[in-house]
Image (tube, rainbow, N blue to C red):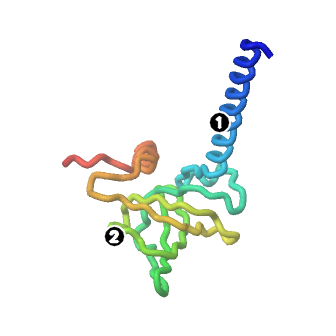
Amino acid sequence: MTRKQKRLSIIFGALAFLGAATGLTFYALGQKASYFYMPDDLKTANLQPGQRIRLGGLVEKGTIVRGQGTDVAFSVTDTGSSVKVRYTGILPDLFREDQGVITEGSFEADGTFKADSVLAKHDENYMPREVADSLKEKGVWQESTQ
């Protein structure tokens, strides 16, 4: 084998390795992706049973029901539609009615969203970007003037 052939074989081997690594990385990221939906978006979404998604909106007034232990049920709304959510765990300190929230989980057979994580806003001026953008499009969310 000549020097030129050795160099070419090393270059092609390195390119094949990088291509395989890139392909595996994109495959792994695609398996872990969870898409963001507002309650109104779910009407047209084609979701598979057990598919993980992120559901965002506002916690609907009067829907927070605390069960035994750390079980809690509430509804997430975008003022057009609402989705019932069940969560078992400790809620963020600032979780309350009419506040922005993003839940992550999947739908159960009865149509209830089973969340395994809940994220709430952290101060008066912050709302998760996706939720704020979607609510602004619907004309529901107004920026704070402070």
In the image, what residue occupies the spot 32% across and 59% down? 122
Which amino acid type is shown beneath numbered disc 1? Answer: Thr
Q: Is residue 1 left or right of residue 82?
A: right
Badge 1 density bin: few <14, some 14–19, many ≥20, Cα 10 Å: few
> Nearer the N terminus, badge 2 or badge 1?
1
Residue situated furthest bottom in the rendering: 68
Which amino acid type is shown beneath numbered disc 2? Answer: Asp
Q: Which residue is mark 1?
A: 22
Badge 2 density bin: few <14, some 14–19, many ≥20, Cα 10 Å: few
Residue 59 drawn at (x, y percent): 43, 64
Q: How many marks?
A: 2
Residue 82 drawn at (x, y percent): 52, 62
Question: Which-is-in-front pick, marks 2 and 1?
Answer: 1
In the image, what residue occupies the spot 60% across and 49% down? 33
In the image, what residue occupies the spot 74% across and 19% down? 6
Distance, label 2 to label 1, CA atoms, is 40 Å
Label 2 SS: loop
Which disc number belongs to residue 93? Answer: 2
* Quadrant (top left/top right/bottom left/bottom right) for the N terminus: top right
Residue 104 drawn at (x, y percent): 54, 60
Which disc number belongs to residue 95? Answer: none
Q: Nearer the viewer, residue 49 or 24?
A: 24
Q: Quadrant of residue 96?
A: bottom left
Q: Is residue 138 left or right of residue 42?
A: left
Query: Image height check: is 74 above or below 51?
Result: below
Residue situated furthest right in the rendering: 1
Query: Image height check: is 146 above or below 17?
Result: below
Residue 107 drawn at (x, y percent): 64, 65
Query: Image height check: is 37 above or below 94?
Result: above
In the image, what residue occupies the spot 71% across and 61% down? 49
